[in-house]
Image (tube, rainbow, N blue to C red):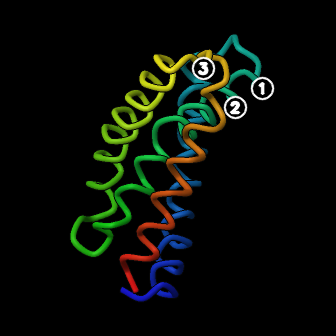
Amino acid sequence: MKNKQLLEKIREEGLYLGIMFVTCLIVFKVIFYREDMVSIIRTVFSLFYMILLPGYFIMIYWIDDIDFKERIVLSVVVGTIIVGLISYYVGIIGLNVKYHVIPIPLIVIVISFLLNAKLNK
């Protein structure tokens, strides 16, 4: 798959990810009806950012081979494993856990996107 086709496919699936995000917001609001909306948005966004998106961008390599639904399920597992392992080893090196939240998922997303773009030429 060429890079332009890959970007188009990611844009198309980004719409599905947005729908999933809104659906999760609604489900969380129903379950935690006493919580304010800002807390729910923060919680759902952090789950997507820390777990789903890193795994999704890692799984882009198999965009032609695996269906979107299957890749989303695998993305949760892969994202949890990769971000968790990197966070563990960065913590062993000495960086405090409170500094892992933003850079680690972002680094995983950027590196996996760039590698997939390079491999899909």
Disc 1 to disc 2, C-alpha distance: 5 Å
Percent coordinates x, y for residue 14 in the rendering:
55, 63
Percent coordinates x, y for residue 88 in the rendering:
43, 21
Between 113 and 17, the one lying in front of the other is: 113
Percent coordinates x, y for residue 89 in the rendering:
43, 24
Between 115 and 37, the one lying in front of the other is: 115
Disc 1 to disc 3, C-alpha distance: 29 Å
Residue extending furthest toward the left? 65
Q: Which of the numbered marks, if any, corresponds to residue 95?
A: 3
Discs 1, 3 touching: Cβ within 8 Å: no
Q: Mark 2 highlights which residue?
A: 41
Residue extending furthest toward the front? 93
What quarter of the picture does the C terminus occupy? bottom left
Asked if residue 42 is positioned above or below residue 113 in the image, the reply reads above
Crowding near the residue tagged with mark 3, few <14, some 14–19, many ≥20 C-alpha atoms within 10 Å: few
Q: Secondary structure at mark 3?
A: loop
Question: What type is the residue that disc 3 sits on?
Answer: Leu
Q: Mark 1 highlights which residue?
A: 38
Q: Is residue 33 left or right of residue 120?
A: right
Question: What type is the residue that disc 1 sits on?
Answer: Val
Residue beneath the point at 37% across and 80% down: 120
Discs 1, 2 touching: Cβ within 8 Å: yes
Q: Which numbered disc flags the more N-terminal residue, 1 or 3? A: 1
Q: Secondary structure at mark 1?
A: helix
Discs 2, 3 touching: Cβ within 8 Å: no
Q: Secondary structure at mark 2?
A: helix
Asked if residue 72 is positioned above or below residue 118 in the image, the reply reads above
Residue beneath the point at 57% across and 40% down: 49
Disc 2 to disc 3, C-alpha distance: 28 Å
State which quadrant residue 30 falls in.
Answer: top right
